Every structure is written in structure tokens, then in C-alpha cells.
Amino acid sequence: MAAMLLPVLPASAQVVSVPVPPSAQVAPIVAVPTIPLPQLTDAQAMQLAALLLRDTLAQGLSLAVPQPMDAAARDQLVRDALDHARAVHAGRLAEADFQRDWGLRPPVFDPLPGFADAVRRDRIAAWFAALPPPYSGYDGLKAGLQRYRGIVAAGGWSALPAGPDLGMGATGPRVFALRNRLAVEDTDVAATGAFDAKLVEAVRRAQRRYGLNPTGIVSTQTLAALNVPATARVRQIMANMERWRWLPQDLPRDRIQVNIAAAVLTVFDGDQPVMSMRAVTGRPGDETPMLSSTIHSVVLNPPWNVPTSIATKELWPKEKKSPGYFKRNGFRVIDGTRLQQKAGDQSALGRYKFDFDNAFSVYLHDTPSRAKFASFSRLASHGCVRLEKPADLAQLLLKGDPAWTPEAIAATIDKGETVRARLAKPVSVYLLYWTAFASGNGQMNFRDDPYGWDATLAAKIEARSASQLVAAR
């Protein structure tokens, strides 16, 4: 990631042009009044320069301390403030920078009217404060960014040397180095001592922060997570702050969020989680896309209409190798080419499917294969999201519908009939890619970047920054 990450777009660059058929009647063009750049007082110019310098770091737009703004260059200062506002409020990518499976787009945002009003009413600081995403998830990353910047400024941490696994009773220089490393992020770790019960618990806390199996033993995976440099953790936090800016400023109160990287589903009531469960998300190469949609129905006893790619690459070869595979596993061939697996205990979709419209043909669903939920590495699907407790989610979504009491749901499941239960109140769903997030107590958690999207995002921001600097000259 570049040292300075301040690429932003003018509002005009975020407008998508739609071709109009020649036969269509063209409405007369109405001139839109242009708002002039506001004129700053001396005091406002000094305040604005200070706010830009401080907020550039606080909002994760710069890895290094930026150069102070020139309060005397008023027009440039205003333009910098507008660019900063677009970056903090709606992110730094143009439409062309988004990959197809990054199916989230920030709304178009023109900061000039609000800024002009803030200057007129002398409320520039309040305008700045209202720009970022108004969510605890973003605030947690912002606080974590400040903390990890402090860690970097203090020298970060040293990489732990390789060697045999470390566990209860171990002693020596590597245990001393482990204590020092853990203490940087965990103030409850003492600086000296053997590998005792308290250090076992400290290792387990670290493993939970990194999404690893909390064995209390420092083996290869734990060592690799501890050896990620502090500067890389700062960049990781910054990338996740950027993705928060792609979300609307007013998320629906009732919603479902899936953290793709952590493979966890959470149901929210406002900003508070009310249900959580493990999930299985797409393996690298079969990525689960980022998207937002609305769950409109729960399909009970769903058949599985097999995607052509899976049928061609995986299932037809199995039938060829072991004739009768389709029959033994409940598949039928439709129109000579398409495969469908009948509903039932063998169905890859299990007994529940949660439908929402999207361009990627993905959905949430049950699965008869339960073993993966016990794993701490759960990126194993073809892109859809498998759920650990789908029956609980179905009951929650259908709660209050007299036709779909828990008893009615169970009876339908037992009959084996395929039934679509429409939700009386559709629920928003967000599939999101969080590799860094803060827990309720403010502790930062990190996950691997399994799809390489953090690195890709940083490269796109850097390229966008370079192109804008050239255009500005």
C-alpha cells in the first residue's frame, strides 16, 4: 500500500452514463445551478488545515504522516477538503476499479452543498465529524488503527524464531521472546517466566484473535500469525475501513451479516447482535461475493439445481467412474444435460435454503455435511454460504407468522415436501469481507486475507491515486 492513500474522485466521476435509444424522446436539458466554492475566513482556513491533517491519519487515508496543509492557499484547501470528504464518506475507488464479485457500491456523494453550508454556519468541525460511516464496527477499527499506529511508532514487534512447537513447561529464549511478543497486544502477559498456565491462556487469547484453534500451543499457524508485522496489521485495518465506506449510511435495523473471511453469520437488531453461528464460505477460486440483498423466502426441503460448472467438473466424472453414482445420491438428469438432486437428507442444500435476489446465484443454506463446522478454517464451499444452525435462523425469520410456527416448520420438514415460505417481513442480508474487526471490548481481531482482496484493494487505491496525480498536473 502506498504511504499516502488519498485518491478520491470528483463527484462527476461517480456518475454512470446510460445510452439513450435514438427513438427515445429527449427531454430538454435543464441547467443545474453551480455552487461556488465557499470563501473561508482566516480562522476557518487554519481550522480546516488542522482538521485535514488530523483526520487524514485518523480515518486511515494515509500510512505516513501527511504534509501540513497550506492555510493560505484557500481554494486548494477547499478542494482538498472536498476530496477528503468523498474519501471518508464514499471510499476512494471509481466504478471501474470494482471487481465483479465486489458487489457493493457506495452511493454517489457530492460534499460541496454540505460543506458550503458548514462554512456559512461556521460548523466545519461538525461537518467533518458526520462524514465517516456511523457504525460501531467502523469506530472499532478507527480506535484499533490508532492503537496499532502507536505500536508501530514504538518499534512494532520482532519476529519469533522458528523451532519446535512451544507448550506448557517450555523454557528458554524462545519463551522469553514469545512473552515479549504477546505483551505488545495483551497487557495481561508478564515479561518473564516459563511456559506456565497463564501463558497458555495468553496464547489461547491470541489464537482466538487470529481465528485459530485455541490449543494454547504455539505451532506453525500461530507462529505465522504472530509474525505478521505491525505495519501490515495497520494496512489491514485501513483496507477494512475502506470497505465500510461502501455501505449505506443507514443500514436496516434488522439485518443478517456474513463475514466471509471469518465464515460467521450474525443476525443484528440495530447495532446489536442477537444470533450468531458458524458458516462455511467460498474457498479461494470459488469466492463468496460481497453483496447486499433481501431474503424474501425460506425454502423447506429444497432440491438442488446443480450449476453447470459443478456438474461438468465434479459430478459427471463421478458417474463415469462409478456408474450408478447419480441414482445412489438422488440425482436426476434433466433434458440430457442438467442435474437436479432431489430434496432429502442427501441433498447438498440440506433441509433449508434462504433465497435472495443477486447476480451471483448464491444463497444461504443447510448442509448434511456437518464436520466442517468444527474446523477453524471454513472456506470450503463453491461460493454459497452453508449454515451451522439453519433451523434456528428459519424460525427467527418466520417468527410471528401464524402459518409458520416452529411446529408447522418441523411438520413440513418431516413430510419431505418442497415448500416456499414467504417472509411477511423480508430481511436485508449483507455478505461482507472483514479481515480485521474489533470485538465488543475493543480488542482487535484479524483473519487471513484468503482471497487476496486486501492486497488487491490497496493496489487499486494506489493506481487510482497515481492516475489522479497525473491528471491534476
Image: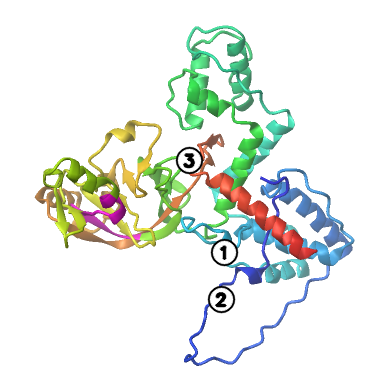
Image check: 110 left or right of 408? Answer: right
Q: Amino acid at mark 3?
A: Pro
Quarter that holds the C terminus: bottom right
**Residue plotted at (31% across, 44% down):** 387
- Label 1: state its secondary structure: helix
Q: CA distance from mark 1 to mark 2?
A: 11 Å
**Residue plotted at (38% across, 37% down):** 378
In depth, the one of 62 and 81 nearer the eye is 62
Q: CA distance from mark 2 to mark 3?
A: 34 Å
Q: Which mark is residue 142?
A: none
Q: In terms of image quadrants, where is residue 44? A: bottom right
Residue 426 lies, in percent from the top left, at: 34, 61
Mark 1 or 3, nearer chain start: 1
Residue at mark 1: 95
Q: Is residue 125 visible?
A: yes
How many residues crowd mark 2 within 10 Å: few (<14), some (14–19), many (20+)?
few
Residue 242 lies, in percent from the top left, at: 59, 51
Residue at mark 2: 17
Residue at mark 3: 450
Which stretch appears magenta?
295-312
**Residue plotted at (12% across, 55% down):** 417
